[in-house]
Image (cartoon, rainbow, N blue to C red):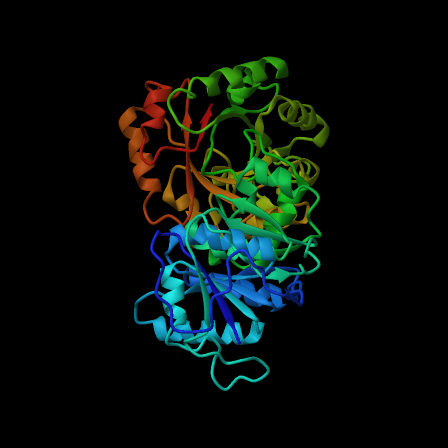
Amino acid sequence: MLAGVLLTVGCTAVPVAPGPTPTPASTPGPAQAPPRTALPAENTTVVTGNGAAELALVTSRSLYLHAPAVVLAGEGDEASLATATSAATKLGVPVLLTPGSGSATASAAADLRTELSRLAPQTVVTVGAAATLWTQGVPLIASGDTGSPTPSAGADTIVLEPGDGVALPDVTPAAPLDELLVLALDQPASRAATATARASGARVLLVANPDPRTNDDVIKALAGQSTARVLALGTEFGPADRLRRRIDTAANGTLLPGGGQVLFPGRRMVALYGHPGDSGLGSLGEQSLSAAITRARKVAASYSSLVKEPVVPAFEIIATVASSAAGADGNYSSESTIAHLRPWVDAARRAGIYVVLDLQPGRTDFLTQAKLYTPLLTQPHVGLALDPEWRLKAGQRHLVQIGSVSAAEINKTAAWLADLTRQHNLPQKVLMLHQFRLDMITNRASVDTSYDELRVVIHADGFGTRGQKFDTWRNMHVKPPPNVWWGWKNFYDEDRPTFTPRQTVAVAPSPVFISYQ
């Protein structure tokens, strides 16, 4: 016969159905067979559940083949849950939650009885009035099952008041599932499921965000865990294949400038724009490398008191420069060598500066040019910018026509960059699209912004008076792709006047990437 133990939280004992004389609280029951646990079949599993009770039940089902004891608490009974989770962890057995009121109660009760039948416990430990009352008047084990007892509402129950000794069954623990890493959100809905995971002997890591790439401490904890079997508790962790990629990235341990492995939200970037050694192309080339680092930090620091997020200095380096001459390859674009750019990229990494490589491809395509810089783009602090103004069609010339690019070409480049990022388990990369006229990107709404490895930024390049800049800004916000972030460029010479940092962050929506030309 099933024996129940009531660990009450209040000061009044809950009435129970008649049964045998209660076992004294100080007398433990006989030793019982150990629980039988099992690793999930898949390398990465996301446990889904609609509410705390279902999440707890599915976690039990995922980790336990048999449990000689089970701990029950009422769903939503937070006062009893702490006692229940403590007891389950000591016993090495699951915590399950009895359903409350509502239209789904009957179905939830049936599911709970089915799980109890599957686990075939000899003892059910109830904690709190809600769990104890639920066990009275309903069979604990689903009718029709075989191989386990079917107790009545009058199952033996021990009522314990606060301060009494808790006579828990003597259960030999199962071999711990120490090969399993369990990720759980630090929230009430996960507590029972988390306790079951701990009871199984798995390694449990509580996180505030379901994306493990967002927190430095979580990344540190996951270092070297790329081969670990993972169970994540909650639908918030998303598809298992995406979670696996995120874990692999976190396990790589590489952080972005400013911390973490997810770009936005959580930081602003303020960049010097231009080409090394060429003062005519923007502020970046107006000084030496060491002086550019100092200047970038100073400009970024001018924003620090204006926003809540960390402000990261950046270089936006024009890697391929639009040319008036066709050149040997006939593409009207002068491609910088890796050797020319690498000192700037490497120095930026050491200085905690993010780098964006800007492409002005002329008559070739963005993907062809992006691939030239693969050795630099495999560095974790290097992103990519596409400048459609300088993407020419056959017969066009720079400064005669304004260039444009199709969404399809952008998407090919995005797919390649995301795949490169994934292959190397790198933090997210910026993919920036420069634009000051809507016709510069055809079919813009179909730009693919869904890659988990990228953050797509539409960067407004307009210059002139305050009114002209806001006209450009408003135009850029007409039917944009979903899930884009926004960038803003300040011009030292062409703007009349140049926006101050305070004026810049006051632009709505406030830009996450700000560059100075």
Residue shown at the point (62%, 43%) measured from the top left: 250
Q: Is residue 47 visible?
A: yes
Q: Position of residue 108 (x, y in %)?
A: 40, 71
Question: In the visual, does 382 lie left or right of 126?
Answer: right
Residue shown at the point (40%, 28%) measured from the top left: 308
Residue shown at the point (61%, 54%) measured from the top left: 244
Q: Position of residue 504 (x, y in %)?
A: 35, 25
Q: Position of residue 517 (x, y in %)?
A: 47, 23
Can you say whether 354 is above or below 420 in the image? above
| Near-viewer residue (359 or 331) | 359
Residue 219 picture quarter = top right
| Near-viewer residue (450 or 464) | 450
Residue 349 picture quarter = top right
Query: What number of labels is visible?
Result: 0
Can you say whether 417 is above or below 124 in the image? above
Residue occupying the far left of the picture = 467
Q: Position of residue 496 (x, y in %)?
A: 32, 19
Residue shown at the point (64%, 43%) measured from the top left: 222
Can you say whether 151 is above or below 320 in the image? below
| Near-viewer residue (125 or 314) | 125
| Near-viewer residue (31 or 148) | 31
Residue occupying the far bottom of the picture = 144
Q: Is residue 447 visible?
A: no
